[in-house]
Image (spheres, rainbow, N blue to C red):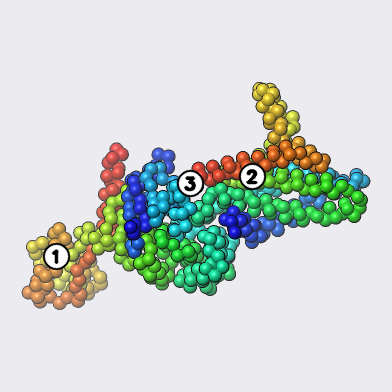
């Protein structure tokens, strides 16, 4: 079996607060699973239970077939974990910090030197190896945390907001790194950045109020958007109004939205009924009326919109249940 | 290298990576000097022993040990490094013992640096060095007891100031528990057996008997079981508090 992470019926209560309310998950080798969800949804708490930091109120977690509760050391040996905020000992330098983690991980001699060198090269830490971690920038602190997590080349990587606080170039580097490592590992990342799901994840789950609302590929996720298969075109602002009217009456078009980009250009979006493909109809229409169109594309769906709809629905259901 | 030793090594170097270690050692040596020579009147007594040196250690430790122990766990919890530490392949017991031993080694270093006092007394007279050795052993055990208490308290709060103050008060109470000040609070209502138990917890009584050069196994057991008890409580406290 290639199921490297298997989570069954996971619950976590803090007093009266239900942080995680029945989560089931399986992550296989080669998968990059993205945890999405609003703040306080239970993403970090779930990760803390997978990595054995918190004990679940109910349910179980197995990492590489080792139960995290009964055999914590065996499970933890196989996990690399970047906790939220990338905590590290501030007075240590990356050199001494990575050396410490390597010692605890049981790396010795040549293997240890190689492991540290490889991690430092992958994460581009060379330039700050001898500065106290507390004096490093947010981006470098995060990278020290990442280096620590991949040091022992673990089968399972759990990364809580790995790109938070990084600049766009660093984000790109980290995403590339994750993709490079993906074939050999099971990786779970949490993120607020929805584009990251498309960029690195092979599967996404949405967590809200401690429950799984959705699980699927990024494309399936986008397909939940009412913009899925919508057609957007840029046209001269002068003719935008008449185009809107014409498109609105086409069969399978539910409604038309437009946004003015500047005085000359307006972007018109035709939203289909039930996500039906409408691009052909619209192309015909454009030819018939001989409109001059600057750009035209079919939308895969808007992730932020799906995210909002799903999580807001969950919240309103939650509130109804409470009243 | 065992994982406890790895933790010990990291913790000990953490003391010396910040000014904490140097400030502590300087203050400790300064205060032992003041107590020994001015208040204890080592010279004026005209006796070749270190009783005036050791006699004040319980009171010094009560103040200084909480300054060492306060950061042990509250800093880990506050900085979030506890989560990192507890998700590495290491057991909580190993971590608790490793951190405690690091703090204990550190106080042993500070204590060892008082050797000029020992040199002085050997230069001036002809002391019984086995009694002095027993004094150092007793002092180390006492420091260990205070550290275990401080480590446990540090696990209960993320605030180092609170950890310091509460550890100070508890060490103070252990020092005083053979004195009427503490015993009178209990003797009016508690049965005599309980009052006896409380008075037997006195650091001073156990420490002073070691100072006389009589290393009684019961005194060693007392400090040993005190340390074991508070370290066990420390493990439970981290288990209970780590999520918050």
Under tag 1, what secondary structure?
A: loop
Under tag 2, what secondary structure?
A: helix
Q: Is residue A317 left or right of residue B128?
A: left
Under tag 3, what secondary structure?
A: loop
The subunit letter for the residue under badge 1 reads: A
Q: Residue at x 18, y 64 (%)?
A: A229
Sequence-earlier tag: 3 or 2: 2
Residue at numbered disc 2:
B148
Residue at numbered disc 1:
A277
Q: Is residue A160 left or right of residue B55?
A: left
Depicted A42 relative to depicted A105: above or below? above
Q: Give how far across and how far down residue B47 sits, in percent.
A: 90, 45
| Viewer-proximal residue among A34 and A223 | A34
Q: Give how far across and how far down residue A275 sits, in percent.
A: 16, 60
- Seen from this angle, which residue lies furthest front? A1
Q: Are there few (<14), some (14-19), or many (20+) residues within 10 Å of tag 3?
A: few
Q: Residue at x 50, y 58 (%)?
A: A87
Q: Give how far across and how far down residue B138 sits, in percent.
A: 75, 44
**How much space separates mark 1 and mark 3, taking CA atoms?**
50 Å
The verdict on a common chain for dots 1 and 3 is no
Q: Is residue A209 visible?
A: no
Q: Is residue A158 visible?
A: yes
The subunit letter for the residue under badge 2 reads: B
The subunit letter for the residue under badge 3 reads: B
Q: Quadrant of the N terminus of chain B?
A: bottom right
The verdict on a common chain for dots 3 and 2 is yes
| Viewer-proximal residue among B244 and A25 | A25
Q: Are there few (<14), some (14-19), or many (20+) residues within 10 Å of tag 2?
A: many
Q: Is residue B199 left or right of residue A200?
A: right
Residue at numbered disc 3:
B244
**How much space separates mark 2 and mark 1, taking CA atoms?**
70 Å
């Amino acid at each position: 079996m290639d199921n490297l992470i298997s989570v069954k019926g996971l619950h976590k209560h803090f007093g009266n607060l239900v942080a995680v309310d029945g989560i089931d998950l399986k992550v296989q080798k080669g998968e990059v699973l993205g945890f999405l969800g609003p703040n306080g949804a239970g993403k970090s708490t779930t990760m803390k239970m997978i990595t054995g930091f918190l004990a679940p109120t109910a349910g179980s977690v197995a990492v590489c077939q080792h139960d995290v509760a009964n055999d914590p050391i065996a499970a933890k040996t196989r996990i690399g974990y970047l906790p939220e905020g990338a905590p590290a000992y501030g007075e240590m330098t990356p050199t001494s910090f990575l050396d410490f983690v390597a010692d605890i991980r049981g790396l010795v001699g040549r293997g240890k030197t190689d492991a540290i060198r490889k991690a430092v090269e992958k994460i581009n830490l060379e330039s700050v190896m001898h500065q106290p971690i507390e004096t490093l920038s947010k981006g470098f602190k995060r990278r020290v945390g990442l280096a620590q997590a991949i040091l022992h080349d673990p089968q399972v990587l759990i990364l809580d907001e790995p790109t938070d606080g990084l600049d766009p170039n660093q984000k790109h580097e980290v995403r590339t790194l994750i993709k490079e490592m993906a074939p050999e590992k099971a990786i779970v990342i949490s993120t607020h950045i929805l584009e990251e799901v498309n960029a690195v994840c092979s599967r996404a789950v949405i967590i809200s109020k401690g429950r799984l609302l959705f699980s699927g590929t990024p494309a399936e996720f986008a397909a939940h958007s009412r913009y899925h298969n919508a057609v957007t075109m840029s046209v001269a602002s002068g003719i935008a109004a008449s185009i809107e009217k014409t498109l609105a009456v086409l069969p399978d078009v539910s409604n038309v939205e437009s946004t003015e980009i500047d005085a000359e250009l307006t972007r018109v979006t035709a939203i289909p009924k039930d996500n039906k493909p409408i691009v052909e109809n619209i192309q015909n229409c454009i030819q018939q009326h001989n409109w001059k169109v600057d750009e035209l594309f079919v939308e895969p769906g808007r992730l932020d919109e799906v995210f909002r709809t799903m999580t807001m629905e969950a919240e309103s259901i939650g509130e109804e249940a409470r009243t | 290298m065992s994982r406890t030793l790895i933790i010990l090594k990291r913790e000990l170097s953490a003391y010396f990576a910040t000014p904490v270690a140097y400030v502590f050692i300087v203050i400790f040596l300064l205060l032992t000097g003041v107590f020994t020579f001015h208040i204890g009147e080592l010279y004026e007594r005209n006796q070749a022993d270190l009783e005036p040196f050791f006699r004040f250690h319980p009171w010094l430790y009560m103040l200084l040990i909480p300054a060492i122990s306060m950061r042990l766990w509250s800093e880990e919890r506050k900085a979030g490094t506890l989560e990192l530490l507890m998700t590495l392949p290491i057991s909580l017991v190993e971590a608790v013992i490793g951190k405690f031993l690091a703090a204990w080694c550190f106080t042993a270093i500070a204590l060892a640096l008082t050797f000029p006092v020992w040199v002085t007394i050997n230069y001036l007279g002809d002391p019984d060095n086995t009694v002095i050795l027993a004094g150092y052993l007793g002092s180390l055990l006492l420091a260990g007891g205070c550290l275990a208490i401080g480590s446990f308290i540090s696990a209960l709060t993320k605030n180092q100031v609170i950890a310091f103050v509460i550890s100070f008060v508890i060490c103070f109470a252990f020092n005083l528990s053979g004195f009427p000040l503490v015993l009178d609070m209990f003797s009016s209502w508690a049965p005599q057996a309980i009052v006896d138990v409380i008075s037997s917890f006195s650091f001073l009584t156990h420490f002073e008997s070691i100072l006389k050069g009589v290393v009684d196994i019961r005194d060693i057991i007392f400090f040993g079981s005190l340390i074991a008890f508070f370290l066990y409580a420390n493990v439970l406290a981290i288990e209970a508090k780590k999520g918050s």
